[in-house]
Amino acid sequence: MTLGKVIGSVVSTMKHSCYENKKLMLVKPVSPYNKEGKGVMVAVDLVGAGKGDVVLISSEGRAAQELLNFPARMPLRSIIVGIVDRIETGDV
C-alpha cells in the first residue's frame, strides 16, 4: 500500500477493455508527513476520489483482479482503495 495525492485525471477514448467505465486518476506518491515522493502513477479510482485528496493505493495486480472481479489477469496494477481523512504518526 502507498499513500498518494491525486493531482489530476486521465481521459482516454481508446483503451484496454479492463479500463472501460473506470475513472483513471493521476497520483503522486506522498509520505505520511505530506512530503512528495518521486514519480507519478495512474490508478483506477474505486472510491470517488478527487483532485487534492490523499488516497490509499494498492499497487498489486492481484488485488485489482479480485476487487474488480476479473476472471483472468488484466493489464491493471494500481487502484485507489481509500480516501485518507487523517494520519496519526505518534510524533509530538
Image (cartoon, rainbow, N blue to C red):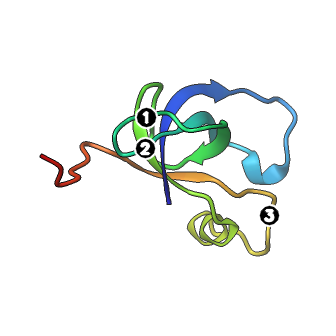
Q: Name the residue nearer the viewer: 7 or 63.
A: 7
Residue found at x 61% / y 72%: 66
Name the secondary structure under disc 2.
loop
Q: CA distance from mark 3 to mark 1?
A: 32 Å
Q: Amino acid at mark 2?
A: Ser
Residue ranking furthest to the left? 92
Residue found at x 58% / y 36%: 27
Q: How many marks?
A: 3
Give the answer, above or below, for where 32 lies relative to 68: above
Residue found at x 85% / y 41%: 15
Q: CA distance from mark 1 to mark 2?
A: 5 Å
Q: Quadrant of residue 63?
A: bottom right
Q: CA distance from mark 3 to mark 2?
A: 29 Å
Circle 1 sits on which residue? 35
Name the secondary structure under disc 1.
loop
Circle 2 sits on which residue? 31
Residue 53 image position (x, y, % from top left): 40, 32
Q: Which mark is residue 69?
A: none
Name the secondary structure under disc 3.
loop
Residue 61 image position (x, y, % from top left): 69, 66
Q: Are marks 3 and 2 in contact (CB under 8 Å)?
A: no
From this viewpoint, is residue 23 visible?
yes
Q: Are marks 1 and 2 in contact (CB under 8 Å)?
A: yes
Residue 64 image position (x, y, % from top left): 63, 64
Q: Is residue 71 left or right of residue 66?
A: right
Circle 3 sits on which residue? 74
> Of the residues under marks 3 and 2, which one precedes in the sequence?
2
Q: Amino acid at mark 3?
A: Met
Residue 86 image position (x, y, % from top left): 24, 43
